[in-house]
Image (tube, rainbow, N blue to C red):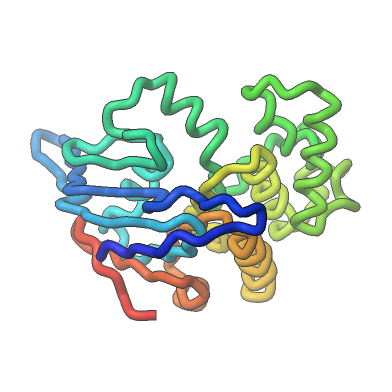
Amino acid sequence: MTMTTDASTDPAGTTPPTGPIYRLRAITKTYSQKGRSIVALKGVDLDLQAGDFVAVQGPTGGGKSTFLQLLGALDRPTSGSIALGGTELSNASDAALGRLRATEIGFVFQGFNLIPTLTAIENVEMALEPLHVPAADRRRRAAEALAQVQLADRQDHLPGELSGGQQQRVAIARAIVKDPRVLLADEPTGNLDEQTRDEIMAVLTALNATGLTLVVVTHDSHVAGMAQRRLRLKQGAVTELAT
């Protein structure tokens, strides 16, 4: 399942780093539940390249959420190696993983998780506070992120004054405002109608086209069909599907 790409030279004449953005080797994850061991992932070997758009599908309980948590440095494998760039996530300190999540990884969820008493721009700015970005720069970058998801005219609106699709756009802006290398999305269109789903996916695919690595967990085959790569997770095993 490993995929490799040749290095290329950018317009500035420099050669970007080679190798995958994610490298997973022999990843297992087990949980103890009511005195028995539950295997969520078993023996996963996988490379994800920078700029990939990967859809992850599979039945409930097949390991999708666990897989995304490991990619997001929110959990550690029971055994095996998982690296993001040059950082080995399986044995990094909690502080190092926290810094990585704050700077390198953006998250989008099915629930928008916006703070209802904050405006759209204030919700987006919250992602920059842990980075100690000066207030003026936070406001500028948040406004730019909202413009990138076509919400420049809604930045002063509270979440309750926005549609579901608009709230998800705010959540995406909050995820990208820190300029991450990776965007992880867990059922980002699960609460949306088909038209709004397509609008959100247009935003995500446009971000991916800029070079942002995008991993989307979805039950929606239409969404999965937009991806460059499709993975199926079932009973803890990963299979790559033809696209």
Image label count:
0
Q: Is residue 103 above or below residue 112?
A: above
**Foreground: 186 or 116?**
186
**Foreground: 146 or 208?**
208
Image location of residue 134, percent across then percent down: 78, 21
Q: Residue furthest front?
A: 13
Is there any visible trace of residue 226 in the rendered image?
A: yes
Residue at point 22%, 55% (across, down)? 45
Image location of residue 238, percent across then percent down: 24, 62
Residue at point 30%, 67% (across, down)? 232
User: Which part of the image, by quadrant, shows the N terminus?
Assistant: bottom left
Image location of residue 123, percent across then percent down: 73, 36
**Foreground: 239 or 47?**
47
User: Left or right: 154 with respect to 190?
Assistant: right
**Foreground: 149 or 18?**
18
Q: Quadrant of residue 54?
A: bottom left
Q: Quadrant of residue 90?
A: top left
User: Left or right: 63 with respect to 185?
Assistant: left
Residue at point 62%, 62% (across, down)? 204
Q: Is residue 20 above or below residue 136?
A: below
Is there any visible trace of residue 192 in the rendered image?
A: no
Image location of residue 184, percent across then percent down: 49, 50
Q: Is residue 17 above or below residue 234?
A: above
Residue at point 78%, 30% (across, down)? 138
User: Which part of the image, by quadrant, shows the C terminus?
Assistant: bottom left
User: Left or right: 225 with respect to 122?
Assistant: left
Q: Residue furthest left?
A: 36
